[in-house]
Image (tube, rainbow, N blue to C red):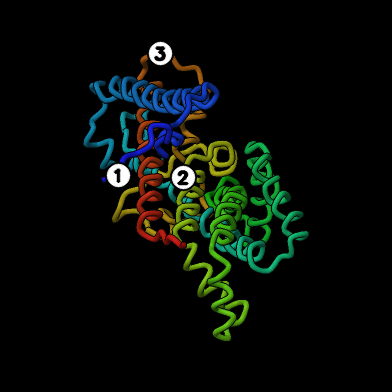
Amino acid sequence: MTTESPDVEHPTSSLTGKARPGELAIRAFLFLCGAISIATTIGIVYELGKESLLFFQDDAVSVFDYFTETVWQPQAGSFGIWPLVLGTVFISVIAMLVAVPIGLLAAIYLSEYASPRVRNFFKPVLEVLVGIPTVVYGFFALTFMTPLLRSLIGSSVVDFFNVASAGIVVGILIVPLISSLSEDALRAVPDSLRQAGYAMGASKLEVSTRIVVPAALSGIAAGLVVAMSRAVGETMVVTLASGAAPRNFAFGEDPLLGYILNPFEGAQAMTGYIVITASGDLGYNTIDYNSIFAIGLTLFFMTLGLNSLSRRLVKRFREVYE
């Protein structure tokens, strides 16, 4: 039987955490910031929901027609959301078709091919595009991209206000977002995977496209969804370049490619309608005034769905390396 000497201190006693007022203050501040963010989101949803309820309680508005009709003409009592959704989604899809290949190729070059000196020069240059006001992009689309499309394709084919011009410029706008997020995901891939590929005789291109890109797929996919959300919520470019009239349509009557999905005709996006309607002379609690909150709530849930999809993609394709 052994006994411990009374003057021997237990080793666990030296591991007891000490109170650090500075660290506690930082934790409290971080908690406060998180609480403010959550409270702000709840407040936004509450205000949108409250005002949207006034819109749907109006006798002229039907919830069923709102989600099923394809004509948006408030003056005529038609409140089908699909023409505005069509304009928003159409512009966003064109933007992604422009931004994804450019942004991904730029990210692969900066991560795998560029020297540190070249990377340190080009990455800030790309990110400068983020700081340009979107109204500048809008006038760029209106005064440069639209005349360019009309000169290449024909002024009789391309309307002055058109979806293609707005989509291309929104794509240019989100290129830095895709390239920056994708490049961060690519650089997070362990260098041991690259060295293993070279040891197996793979070329630089094969290592980049067949090893590094698949390994960073979760981060790239999340970046693409975030960029899509940014394109959906873009306001000034679509307001100035795509037109101020919803593209009302009727399935079976209007041609699909000749009118409904024609990128060279104008179409109003959800954000464009909100800006134009809110800047007009509207009285409180009128049906036009309340409609912008209903559209804003619809747009909120669209972006919420995209962000939820981003989280699922990250969890689905995430790879953890030791």
The picture places residue 116, in percent across and down from the top left corner, at 74, 60
Q: What residue sits right under mark 3 in the picture?
A: 284
Residue at point 40%, 45% (across, down):
307
Q: Is residue 96 left or right of residue 169?
A: left
Q: How crowded is mark 2: few (under 14 residues within 10 Å), some or many (20 or more)?
A: many
Which mark sits nearer the N-terminus, 2 or 3? 2
Q: Nearer the viewer, mark 2 or mark 1?
A: 1
The picture places residue 64, in percent across and down from the top left corner, at 21, 36
Tell me the SS state at disc 1.
loop
Say what amino acid the circle numbered 1 marks: Thr
Residue at mark 1 to residue at mark 3: CA–CA distance? 85 Å
Which mark sits nearer the N-terminus, 1 or 3? 1
Q: Is residue 263 left or right of residue 112?
A: left
The picture places residue 137, in percent across and down from the top left corner, at 65, 42
Which mark sits nearer the N-terminus, 2 or 1? 1
Residue at mark 2 to residue at mark 3: CA–CA distance? 30 Å
Residue at mark 2 to residue at mark 1: CA–CA distance? 69 Å
Say what amino acid the circle numbered 2 marks: Ser
Tell me the SS state at disc 3.
loop
Residue extending farthest bottom: 201
Q: What residue sits right under mark 2 in the picture?
A: 229
Q: Which of marks 2 and 3 is in front?
A: 2
**Image quadrant for the N terminus?**
top left
Q: In this view, does 288 lie to the left or right of 26?
A: left
Q: Residue 191, relative to residue 316: is it above or below?
A: below
Cβ–Cβ under 8 Å for marks 1 and 3: no
Which numbered dot is residue 2?
Answer: 1
Find residue 122 and report its image quarter. bottom right
Residue at point 37%, 58% (across, down):
255
Say what amino acid the circle numbered 3 marks: Tyr
Tell me the SS state at disc 2.
helix
Residue at point 51%, 49% (across, down):
227
